[in-house]
Image (spheres, helix red, strand yellow):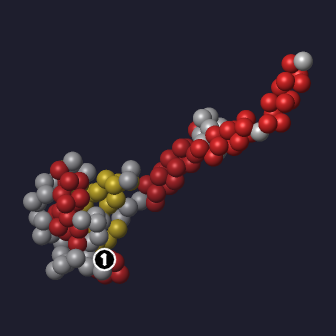
Amino acid sequence: MRIDKYLWCIRVYKTRSIATDAVKKGHIQVNNQPAKASRDVFPGDKISVRKDQINYQYTVLDIPPNRVGAKLVDMYRKDETPAEAFEHLQLLRLAKDHYRLKGEGRPTKKDRRNIDDYLDDDTYFEQLNNEAN
C-alpha cells in the first residue's frame, strides 16, 4: 500500500491529499529515509511523521484493507513516539504564554472598548476642566 494512503487509512491525516502534501514536503520518512508518495509500506517498516512540531514514530504491524475506525487503528500500527516529544510541545505552549500575559502589551479589543467607554464618560472631561482651572 502507498505511504500516503496508509497514513490516511490509519487516521494520521484527515484526507489523503493532506497526507500526499506532507510526503511531498518531506515530513515523512520510512526506515530513516525520505519517502515519496508512491512508496509502498510493508509490515515491520518504521515510519517517522513530523506533524504539529512532534516527530511521531510508528511501526507498521499490518496493512489495512481500507480506512479503519479509530478504535481499530492500533491493530495496524504501533505508536512508539517518545513521551519527551509531548513534553517538549507542552513546554513550547507554556513559553508562548510567558511572553504575552493577558493585559500586557497592546490592548485587546475588549481593553480598547473599555478605554473608549471611559473616555466617552462626561465626568472625565469635567474633571480635566476643573484641574486645568
Secondary structure at numbered mark 1: helix
Quadrant in the rendering for residue 130: top right
Q: Which residue is mark 1?
A: 73
Q: Looking at this view, is 30 or 94 the one in front?
A: 94
Please tell me which residue is depicted at 81% across the width and 33% down the height of the picture: 124
Please tell me which residue is depicted at 22% across the width and 60% down the height of the picture: 19
Kindly tell me whether residue 54 is visible in this rendering: yes
Where's residue 21, x and y in %? 20, 54
Rendered-image quadrant of the C terminus: top right
Reply above or below: 39 against 64. Answer: above
Quadrant in the rendering for residue 71: bottom left
Reply above or below: 54 against 71. Answer: above
Total marks in image: 1
Quadrant in the rendering for residue 115: top right
Give the residue type at disc 1.
Val
Disc 1: CA contacts within 10 A as few (<14), some (14-19) or many (>=20): some
Q: Looking at this view, is 106 or 64 the one in front?
A: 106
Reply above or below: 19 against 44. Answer: above
Please tell me which residue is depicted at 71% across the width and 42% down the height of the picture: 117
Where's residue 131, x and y in %? 88, 22
Rendered-image quadrant of the N terminus: bottom left
Where's residue 24, x and y in %? 17, 50
